[in-house]
Every structure is written in structure tokens, then in C-alpha cells.
């Protein structure tokens, strides 16, 4: 099951396409409002994948979603990608020191708590297959300061904590792996809305020995994490960023000054 494919710029869109190319049968889901504005139905038709509407902040919706998905797939779910993030504060141009806390609560609910809620429903309904894999997409702002990333950085830090904590419980119960992938800045609909995105996209690209990782390569990494080749990897935040996370100084960046 793939959460969050909005349009062709979405990482989730590429993950869905890659998984089907590798032989998977999948279901797709997004929030009702996103389904009206995006083109997920087009993706579903192309991949012969059932598209099921669900609000990831609703336990009732998620329960129904996983039940329907099991019916479509003919059994428990082998892998799930959580690719969900939204900040009204970012959209409205609020700085970190001037956050609207009602909006911040919504950011945390949609961008992080939805991951815990999703896993809780999967856990309590026993919807995951033994040895399955759960992933969510993160960003290095969970560990480093990127001022314009705003409270989404806090949401990603919480997201990564949920992966570690629930990874323990899921591992003990069913051998299910839970990990996050910290991806390079990527030109998605959501990412491009962050103030100064082009500047720190270019900065990361120049700082990283391999350059920024593409959405297509991220999709391939996700497919590896869903596969049986990574059955002993869990509770990890995995950097997929061309080496950016290990860099201190790169002469290529200094020479531009």
C-alpha cells in the first residue's frame, strides 16, 4: 500500500511505479481533498491498482482502508509507504518564531501522528504480513537546523521517533520492519513550497559528493527496503542523500563564495 501519491512529481508516485515494475500488486490511497486536486486515479489506471480514499488523521478511515486493501490484495499487506506531509504555517509564510500553534497542531497531526495512527491500526487489526516492511519519508532537518523548513523539522523528528518505538513492538509481534528514509531535497509539490527551496536544493547538490538523490532512485531504495534483502534492518533512519549527511565542508561550495 502506498500513501501520498499526488501527481508525477510525488516520490510516492515513483515508488508505486517501481514496485509494480518489480512485480508487486499494490493499492493506492490519499486524502479525499488531495484526490480531487491530484491525478492519482490516472496512476491507479496505469498500474492496475485500486485507489482507496482515506483521511490518514482518522482511525475509522484507516481501519476501513486496510480492510478494503486486504480484500483487494487477497490477504495481509506486505509493505506500506507513508509519504504524507503538510504545513499551513509553511504555506502561509509564517516564520518559526511566529508559528500559529493551531496550524502547528495540524502539521504534527497530518505529517507525523498519522504515521503512528497508521501503524497502530495495522498493529491492532493484524493487517501486516509476517516479516513485512513499513517505511516513511523523512528529511535531515529532523537533526539539523534548516530555518525555512519550519515546524516540519519537528514533525520529521517525531516521525523518526515513532519509527523506532513502533519498530520494536512490530518486530517482536510479527517480525515487521519499520524504518524512515531521509531523502535529499526533491522537487515535489510539497517540497517546492518551502521558502528558499531552490537555494538549499542547489546547496545540497553541490555539498553532496554524489549530488542530490533523485525521486526515481529513492523509489528504488524503497523497493529494496520492502524486499526480503533487508529483513534484518529495522528502527533505522536511513540517509539517501548522496552523502550530504556525512559532509562537513566541500570545496565545491566554498569556491562559489
Image (tube, rainbow, N blue to C red):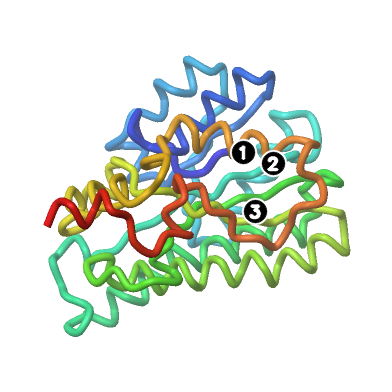
Quarter of the image for the C terminus: give it: bottom left
Give how far across and how far down residue 195 sits, in percent: 16, 59
For image coordinates 58% across by 37% down, the residue present is: 221
Q: Is residue 11 found left or right of 39 in the rendered image?
A: right
Residue at point 66% right, 45% down? 66
Up-down relation of residue 74 to residue 237 (above or below)? above
Q: Which residue is mark 1?
A: 1
Which of these two is toward me, 2 or 242? 242
Secondary structure under the numbered disc 2 in the rendered image: strand
Q: Residues within 10 Å of mark 2 (few under 14, many from 20)?
A: many
Name the mark nearer the viewer: 2 or 3: 2
Q: Classify mark 1: helix, strand or loop.
A: loop
Element on which disc 3 rests: helix
Callout 1–callout 3 Cβ contact below 8 Å? no
Tell me what residue is drawn at x 36 percent, y 76 percent: 105
Placement of 72 over or under 68, stated as above or below:
above
Q: Nearer the viewer, mark 1 or mark 2?
A: 2
Disc with the residue nearer the chain's start (1 vs 2) = 1
Placement of the N terminus among the 4 image quadrants: top right
Q: Are marks 1 and 2 in contact (CB under 8 Å)?
A: yes
Relative to 27, is 42 above or below?
above
Residue 103 coordinates in the image, percent (x, y): 28, 73
Mark 2, residue position:
79
Q: Earlier in the sequence, mark 2 or mark 3?
A: 3
Res 63 label: 3
The spot of residue 255 in percent (x, y) is 18, 52
Image-quadrant location for residue 151? bottom left
Amino acid at each position: 500500500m502506498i500513501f501520498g501519491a499526488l501527481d508525477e512529481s510525488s516520490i510516492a508516485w515513483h515508488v508505486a511505479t517501481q514496485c509494480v515494475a518489480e512485480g508487486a500488486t499494490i493499492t493506492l490511497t490519499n486524502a479525499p481533498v488531495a484526490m480531487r486536486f491530484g491525478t492519482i486515479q490516472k496512476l491507479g489506471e496505469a498500474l492496475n491498482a485500486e485507489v482507496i480514499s482515506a483521511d490518514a488523521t482518522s482511525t475509522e478511515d484507516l481501519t476501513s482502508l486496510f480492510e478494503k486493501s486486504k480484500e483487494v490484495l487477497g490477504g495481509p499487506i506486505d509493505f506500506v509507504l507513508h509519504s504524507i506531509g503538510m504545513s499551513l504555517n509553511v504555506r502561509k509564510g509564517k516564520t518559526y518564531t511566529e508559528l500559529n500553534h493551531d496550524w502547528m497542531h495540524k502539521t504534527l497531526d497530518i505529517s507525523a501522528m498519522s504515521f503512528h495512527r497508521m501503524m497502530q491500526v495495522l498493529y491492532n487489526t493484524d493487517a501486516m504480513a509476517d516479516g513485512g516492511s513499513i517505511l516513511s519519508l523523512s528529511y535531515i532537518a529532523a537533526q539539523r537546523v534548516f530555518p525555512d523548513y519550519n515546524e516540519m523539522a519537528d514533525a520529521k523528528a517525531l516521525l523518526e521517533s515513532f519509527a523506532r518505538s513502533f519498530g520494536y513492538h512490530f518486530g517482536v509481534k510479527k517480525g515487521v520492519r519499520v524504518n524512515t528514509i531521509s531523502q535529499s531535497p526533491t522537487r515535489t509539490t510539497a517540497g517546492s513550497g518551502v521558502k528558499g527551496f531552490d537555494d538549499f536544493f542547489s546547496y545540497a547538490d553541490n555539498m553532496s559528493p554524489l549530488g542530490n538523490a533523485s525521486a526515481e532512485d529513492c523509489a528504488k531504495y524503497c523497493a529494496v527496503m520492502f524486499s526480503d534483502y533487508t529483513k534484518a534492518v529495522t528502527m533505522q533512519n536511513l540517509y539517501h542523500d548522496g552523502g550530504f549527511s556525512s559532509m562537513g565542508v566541500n570545496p565545491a561550495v566554498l569556491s562559489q563564495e
